[in-house]
Amino acid sequence: MSSRRAVYTSKAPKPLGGLLSQAIVANGFVFTSGVIASDPETGHMIGEGDIQAQFHQCVKTLGAILDQAGSSLGDVVDVTLMVADSSQFASMNEAYKGYWGDIKPARMTIFCTELPPKSLVELKCVAVVTKSKM
């Protein structure tokens, strides 16, 4: 029998009008919604025009959500990246290299013509739940 629970943390931007959860935990995995580089307190975009700064903020936000779910960045098994400008792909990859140690998660990159305003990158991930959270 499958069980699932929603994950919310104040260390990540609030979900849009009750339309989604920050993440769902189900069957030992956590599935995050996509995150952009907005400040959780103000909602303002961080690193406007700088894909590396936005990428780092997205990873910070994912880390907070994963922690609330009983997981961590080290437990990530799959990453999906949405990138608004393919000419910034190499720069984003430079930021990416600093995460996930020797065993990198599986990954998909999608080049999008539109992301939320001022967003250069959006991330989502799947991770293994390694700690009990109730």
Image (cartoon, helix red, strand yellow):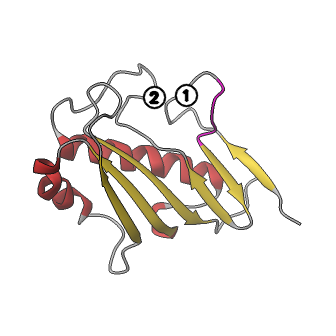
19 inside magenta stretch: yes
**Front-most of residues 39 and 2:** 2
State the image coordinates of residue 90 (x, y, percent, origin top left): 12, 58
**Front-most of residues 21 and 56:** 21
Is the C-beta separation of discs 2 and 1 under 8 Å?
yes
The answer for how far apart the CA atoms under marks 2 and 1 are is 7 Å
Q: Quadrant of residue 20?
A: top right
Say the numbered circle drawn on residue 40: 2
70 inside magenta stretch: no
In the picture as drawn, the residue positioned furthest to the right comes out as 1
Say the numbered circle drawn on residue 5: none
Q: Give the SS element for disc 2.
A: loop
- Mark nearer the N terminus (2 vs 1): 1
In this rendering, the answer to whether 102 lies above or below 13 is below
In magenta, the rendered stretch is 18-22
Instruction: Please state which amino acid type lies under the numbered disc 2.
Output: Pro
Q: Which residue is mark 1?
A: 14
Q: Give the SS element for disc 1.
A: loop
Which quarter of the rendering shows the N terminus? Answer: bottom right
**Front-most of residues 79 and 46:** 79
State the image coordinates of residue 96 (x, y, percent, origin top left): 26, 60
